[in-house]
Image (spheres, rainbow, N blue to C red):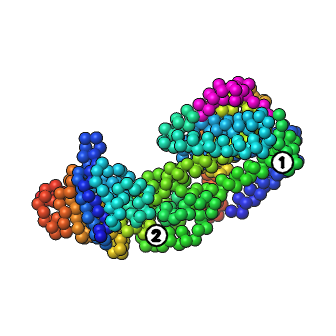
Amino acid sequence: MSGRFLALGIALVALATLPYWMTGIYYINVASQILFYAIFALGLNVLVGYAGLVSLGHAGLFGVTAYAVGYFLQLGFGHPFAILAALVISMVSMAIYAVLSLRSTGIGFIMITLVLGEILWGLAYRWISLTGGDNGLSLQTRPAPFGFSLSDVNTFYYATLIIFLLSIGAVAIFVRSPLGAALMGTRDQPRRMNALGYHVWAIRFYACLFSGLLTSVSAILFVYYTQFISPQTLSLTSSAEVLLMVISGGAGTLLGPIVGAGLVVIVKTVVSGFIERWNFLLGAIFVAIVILMPEGLVPGTARLWRLAWRKRERSAKSVPGSAEAKP
Amino acid sequence: MTALTVSGLCKSFGGLHVTTDVNLNVEPGERRLIIGPNGAGKTTLFNLITGELTPDAGTIKLFGQDITRVPSRRRPHLGMARTYQIITLFARDTIIHNVTLALMGLSPSRWNPLIDLKRQGHFVEHAQAALERVGLGHIANRPLSQTSYGERRRVEIAMALTQNPKVLLLDEPFAGLSIDERRDVKELLLAIPRDVTIVMIEHNMDVALEFAERITLLHFGEVIVEGNRAEVVANPRTREVYLGH
């Protein structure tokens, strides 16, 4: 237990001091990207990991938020209004998305979310008067909350870090709460949960809203980071990428999506600078994960760690015994 | 007032009539046994009573209140609990968490996303008490995946009992149990106080006959014989369709 707290403390200190020991603006930006993609993955994990509902259209929702921010800024509104309006629009979109897709579970849910994601992608592509079509929307400025301009790389990193910590805290509280336990119950035995007096649909609906909130928070950070949004962001590839972050890190765990986000972002941005066929490398890594640790990197490593620990303890115990037996 | 009244209940799946004009009147505190050959529609009747299936016709009343149109998830709140013939538990969790989920189902705090469930002392106490009652108190924190079939049957019963039901529906609580486990479960069921009305489906006649006061025999979805223990066993139709000669 104390070992876990120590590890968490070290991770926190490392994150908080990152701009001081990480050399180069480029890598601080990569860290920012990992953090806001981790929020996205945390949001998707609420559905995939804890609700057992695999969504393949989350990039669509992510895009709705990003476009909303870009659109309101283009109309001349200020940052606070654009952010708030984007959040409201995203939550309404998520509610509609949930009502439509929660008519089904399993494969049906995947297919409906896939279609909804594709519809949003199509809208972004074709509704040119609103989205600028293929050209996308550009954002001229980043906000400066409390006088800290987010145009500064380090400031942006710290803002992202704070929002990331708030997000992971929110998820941690949620999964320990009665509603979180109820959600996991609906994942494992929906019929029994219904017979025990739970409103299974409503529990899933709230999970969708929570997932949508985290998704749009990460989308706001994303759109301010890139200062650009195009239909590419809403594509099926983007949805699949986040899903891979969740699955490779470990669905249904708190740290899994974060590790997954780190893996995907590092391969996509850093390693791609050295290896042209980085897509192939990413694919190979996923195949390796699926074969060696199908439960994901975080639970898989924990399992190997326990195994190694037990082996060490056993050999430590058996050494004096075997020494006696030999002579 | 009767505890559970079923009148004119019908249900068909396509052309197959699984429940045909079933009438039941179960008095408060009664122990009712429902028997019948395989495919007689016993579990379907339970699914209709608990609302997991919607009847084509007929009404269901719980202590005089018409609940035919009440969604199945509301019925536990009105005092109805059930167990499943095929064990339906949360295999990833501990025994006590399974029972806690049952307790939480009737508590308004099930909607709370902010408090820590593990720190809700009253849930832990009540769940522990329910497990003591079925003789599983000593292994409350064991993962369900590491329990025996007989223990799981008792977890099922503990989950139903912890909801303090007025009407308890038991779907084959003795199925698949060893002789010793059967004795334990029988004692457990006999110890349930009389303010709980029990309707039970069971094939194991030795234990079931000892337990039940009134028996309903279903055959092809219809009530063929109903009466007290002696009447039903003596009835020639019981011998014909169920007990054999």
Chain of the residue where label 2 is placed in the rendered structure: B
> What residue type is disc 2 on?
Leu
- Could you say where residue A269 lies in the image, as x and y percent from the top left? 76, 34
Q: Helix, strand or loop at disc 1?
A: helix
Magenta span dominant secondary structure:
helix
Answer with left or right where residue A21 lies relative to residue A110. Answer: right
Which is more toward the observer, B193 or A78? A78
Look at 22% across and 62% down and name the residue there.
B216
- Looking at the rendering, the stretch of residues picked out in magenta corresponds to A117-139
Near mark 2 (Cα within 10 A), the count class, few <14, some 14-19 or many ≥20, is many
Q: Quadrant of the N terminus of chain A?
A: bottom right
User: Within the magenta stretch, is there residue A127?
Assistant: yes
> Where does label 2 land, which residue?
B131
Look at 52% across and 35% down and name the residue there.
A111
Q: Quadrant of the C terminus of chain A?
A: bottom right
Which is more toward the observer, B99 or A99? A99
Look at 21% across and 59% down and name the residue there.
B217
> Where does label 1 land, which residue?
A145
- Could you say where residue A72 lies in the image, as x and y percent from the top left? 75, 37
A230 over A41 or under it: above or below: above
- State whether residue B63 appears in this view: yes
A34 over A184 or under it: above or below: above
A125 over A102 or under it: above or below: above
Near mark 1 (Cα within 10 A), the count class, few <14, some 14-19 or many ≥20, is few
- Could you say where residue A117 lies in the image, as x and y percent from the top left? 60, 34
Q: Helix, strand or loop at disc 2?
A: helix
Q: Nearer the viewer, mark 2 or mark 1?
A: 1
